[in-house]
Image (spheres, helix red, strand yellow):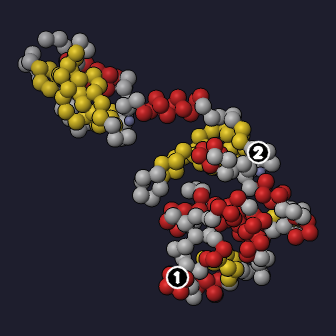
Amino acid sequence: MGDAAHCIDIGYLCNGRNMTAKVEMIGKTFGRLTVLSEAGSDTQGPRWRCLCVCGRVTEVSGKKLRYGATKSCGCLQDEVRRKKVDVIGLRFGRLIITGDAEMYVSPSGKARLRQVSARCDCGNDTVVTLGSLKEGITTSCGCYWLERLADPRKHGHTRKNGVSPEYRSWRGAIQRCENPNAERFPNYGGRGVVMCREWRESFASFLNDMGQKPSATHSIDRIDVDGNYEPKNCRWATPAEQASNKRPRKKALR
Ligand SMILES: [Zn+2]
Ligand SMILES: [Zn+2]
C-alpha cells in the first residue's frame, strides 16, 4: 500500500506494518457534520453517513470531509447564498435591509425566524424579523407611528430632543417583546408575551387606551404577569404598585 498520507486520504491509515486499518471516523465532527457510520465507497474511497447540525443525514466521501470540501448537508451553502443574494438593499417602507442579523430562536426551539438589520430613513438602525417586513407589519424603526399622531405637538408626544415618556414606554414594550437582543427580552418575548396587534401597529391607539402617564415614576404594568400588552391587561403603575403585583392574578381576570 502507499504511504501513510495516502492512506489517510482514502480513510484508512497504515498501521506501520504495511497493512491498513480504519481511521476512527465514527463520531468525528467536520464542520457541521458528525460521522455516524460507513456508507460504502466510490472511486474517491470510503463514504460516510453523517448527521448535520440541521438534523439532516447525508452521505459524504471521507476525502471531502477531511479536506474540508464538505462541511454541511448543503444548509451552509444555502445560508451563504441567501445572505448574499436575496434581501440586502431591499426597501420595505422606510427601512432598507443592510444585512443579516442573528436568527431568532424561540425558547422552545420550534420557531426559527430570520432576522435582518435595517437602516431607517430617519437614521436609526433596527433589527427586525424578515417576516414582519414582508408582511408589512414593520415599515419603520417606529418613527412612522410617532409622526402619524394626529397632532403630535398638541399632545406633546414629540420633543425637540426626543420623544414623549408614553412613546418611550410603548417602544420599550415592543423591544422587550420582539427584540431578542433587548436586555429584558427573556422575561417578555422569550416567555411568549406579545403586544396586541392594534397597539403594535399604532402608538396612537396605545395612547388612546392607556392615557397619559400620571407621573415620571409610572410605567406600564401588566395586571396578569403572564398576560400580554393589551388594553384589558395594562395600566400605568408606580414601582410600589407593581411590586405588590408579582403574583399572577388570572382568577381575578377571568
Ligand atoms: Zn445541514
Ligand atoms: Zn425611523
Say few, some or many: other residues with alpha carbon within 10 Å of mark 2 (under 14 / 14 to 19 / 20 or more): some
The image quadrant of residue 133 is top right
Compared with 191, 1 (above or below) is above
Indicate the position of residue 56 as horizontal and vertical percent values. 33, 37
The residue positioned 76% from the left and 70% from the top of the image is 207
State how far apart marks 2 and 1 are (Cα). Answer: 41 Å
Q: Is residue 250 above or below residue 63?
A: below
The answer to whether residue 112 shows anywhere in this view is: yes
Q: Would you name the residue on which mark 2 appears?
A: 94
The front one of 21 and 127 is 127
The residue sitting at 63% across, 46% down in the picture is 135
In the visual, does 81 lie left or right of 136?
A: left
Q: Is residue 241 above or below residue 75?
A: below
Q: Residue type at mark 2?
A: Arg
* Ligand 1 positioned in quadrant: top left
Of the two numbered discs 2 and 1 on the same chain, state the one appearing first in sequence: 2
Q: What residue do we see at 23% from left, 12% from top?
A: 43
Q: Residues within 10 Å of mark 1 (few under 14, many from 20)?
A: few
Image check: 59 left or right of 92?
left
Q: Position of residue 90 (x, y in %)?
A: 69, 35
Return the x and y of residue 145 as percentages of the image width and height. Answer: 78, 58
Q: Which mark is residue 143?
A: none
* Residue carrying label 1: 254
Amino acid at pointer 1: Arg
Q: Quadrant of the N terminus?
A: top left
Q: Secondary structure at mark 2?
A: loop
